[in-house]
Amino acid sequence: MLVLRLLNVVAPAYFLCISLVTFVLQIFLFIPSMFRDPSTTPLFSPALLHGALFLFLSANALGNYVLVIQSSPEDLGKGLNLGEGAEVVVDWLDGSRSPGSALPSTHFCRLCARVTQRHDHHCFFTGNCIGSRNMRNFIMFCLYTSLACLDSLVAGMAYISAALSMSFANPLAFLTLLPHSISQFFSGALLSSEMFVILMLYLWLGIGLACAGFCCHQMLLILRGQTRYQVRKGMVVRARPWRENLQEVFGKRWLLGLLIPVLNVGSDYRRQKEK
């Protein structure tokens, strides 16, 4: 438990550090290197277009990241009218009742000491549990983080291609880039900044693919009306149309949440059902 609590503190700091490094490399290294092409007009230059795209992806990724943390399950538990369930929550917090006595579709996380409705999992990179209130923001966070990493990967490959006068037309060129660069770095033929960018390329690739895969897996569970916690515990859920499952998570204003980071305050579909 001590290791998990330590990871719960280190992982968000690691993510913010990677985000800061990515932002600095994009703004001060990759984008300025694109201004060297004099054939394009300033309005439609690759630097400005790429800079606008990167800022859009970064703003959505960081905005949804903040909203995932802001929409904490603890706040959700305080806002719910649980009736007798409020006593159960108190029993969980003081340790007098086991987590197995949970209310329907709720789960108490011992790591963050919070009650989550429709608990999915505990995300160490946000230091928060993912549930009904912040699920949409979490999926948008994974989506835009993946896109921002892949965008940085493409920009970094373009920078390395120009700096080292090499081509990535052959897919094997990227696979052999790291061992070849290490040998050049220790022989003094490669600068430290260029070696750092090459290492970041593989880090962006790993994070981008991981976030994309996790986002696709999460969307598949949403279409089925399940959560990772329910799958792990073998819980049986009532079969519903996939459109209803999507609307329960994303609500009717799904397009707004896709373009800008907005707080997911609960789906309109669920409110209509409760009425």
Image (cartoon, rainbow, N blue to C red):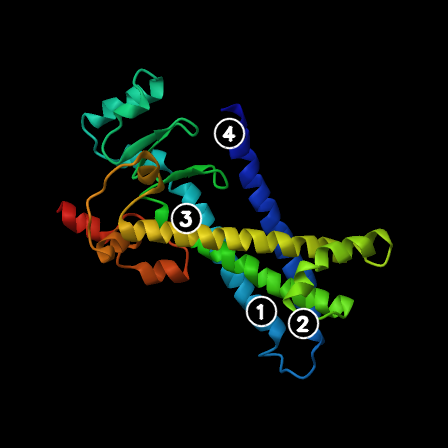
Residue hosting label 4: 4
- Label 3 and label 1: CA atoms lie apart by 25 Å
Mark positioned earlier in the residue sequence (2 or 3)? 2
- Residue that protrudes farthest toward the top in the picture: 96
Q: Secondary structure at mark 3?
A: helix
Number of the front mark, 1 or 4 = 4
- Contact? badges 3 and 4 (CB < 8 Å): no
- Label 2 and label 4: CA atoms lie apart by 43 Å
Q: Quadrant of residue 69?
A: top left
Residue hosting label 3: 138
Number of the front mark, 3 or 4 = 4
- Contact? badges 2 and 4 (CB < 8 Å): no
- Residue that protrudes farthest toward the left in the picture: 275
Instruction: Please name the residue shown 54% across and 62% down the image.
Output: 55
Mark positioned earlier in the residue sequence (1 or 2)? 2
Residue hosting label 1: 50
- Contact? badges 2 and 3 (CB < 8 Å): no
- Label 3 and label 4: CA atoms lie apart by 20 Å
Q: Is residue 100 above or below residue 73?
A: above
- Contact? badges 1 and 2 (CB < 8 Å): yes
- Label 2 and label 3: CA atoms lie apart by 33 Å
Q: Position of residue 102 (x, y in %)?
A: 26, 27
- Label 1 and label 2: CA atoms lie apart by 9 Å
Q: Secondary structure at mark 1?
A: helix
Residue hosting label 2: 34
Q: Quadrant of residue 158?
A: bottom right
Question: What's the residue type where badge 3 is placed?
Answer: Phe
Q: Is residue 104 above or below residue 239?
A: above
Q: Position of residue 146 (x, y in %)?
A: 50, 56
